[in-house]
Image (spheres, rainbow, N blue to C red):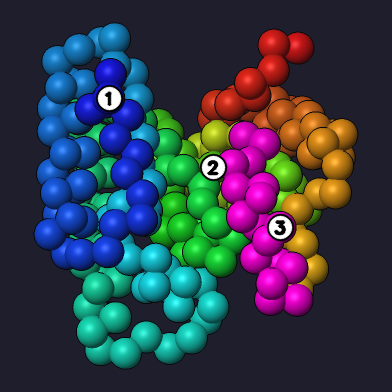
Amino acid sequence: FTILDYSVEGQEEEKDFEKTKLTLLDILTQAKQNPAIPIACLKISGLASNKLLEKYSSKLSLNKSEQFAWKQLKNRLDEIFKKAARISKPFYVDAEETWIQPAIDDLCEIYMAKYNKQEVIVFTTTQMYRKDRLTYLKNTHLKAKNERWKLGVKVVRGAYLEKESKMAEQHGYQNPLHKTKSETDQSYDTAIDYCLENHEQISVCLGSHNEK
């Protein structure tokens, strides 16, 4: 199973990004031949540097080399999702830290708009321990509805609680996460209800870790 869950993150060199891309394409080749492999997943930080993702997310202008790196990242993603669409195997794009998530959000929206016309191939991920994600989910759904594409979303609680809280404290900004587990659970349950109420246009994966 290890090769089928190739969600490598935090790579920094071009050769590593290409290796990750080729591995993901190989996973799709295996998935095409095996109905027991219904989906694949990736982390954007396995295909581009965190430095690039953070700078883009901060809305700072990219220099020429960074613009080229951004174009290369988009080319890699397009190659992956194009093959996924050709063989009808969805891809889950994992959520990551808040300081690189805006770049990931933009990329997911670009490729959901391109490949989620008839069926849902590209899934973004919402971490519901974040205070802003319920609004983001609803706004993205409205965008998809207006632009006539389908939203694919994996709903999770969140994976970087300690790191996010420490970063907010160190840099003196408001913690982006809910203060309590119960607030996160309420946000999570509300997101589930919203997705199910709009199931004709939203395809949802529930990464709940919670039987109830």
Alpha-carbon distance for marks 3 and 2?
A: 20 Å
Chief secondary structure of the magenta portion? helix
Question: What stretch of residues is rendered in magenta?
Answer: 156-172
Category of crowding for the residue at label 1, using alpha-carbon neighbours closer than 10 angstroms: few (below 14), some (14–19), many (at least 20): few
* Residue at the image position 13 percent from the left and 27 percent from the top: 29
* Quarter of the view holding residue 72: bottom left
Name the kind of residue labelled 1 in the image.
Thr
Q: In this view, does 54 lie to the left or right of 129?
A: left
Residue highlighted by disc 2 = 125
Residue highlighted by disc 1 = 2
Residue toward you, 32 or 118: 32
The percent position of residue 42, horizontal first and vertical second, equals: 35, 41
Alpha-carbon distance for marks 1 and 2?
A: 21 Å
Residue highlighted by disc 3 = 165
Q: Is residue 97 visible?
A: yes
For the N terminus, which image quadrant?
Answer: top left
Q: Of the residues under marks 1 and 2, which one precedes in the sequence? A: 1
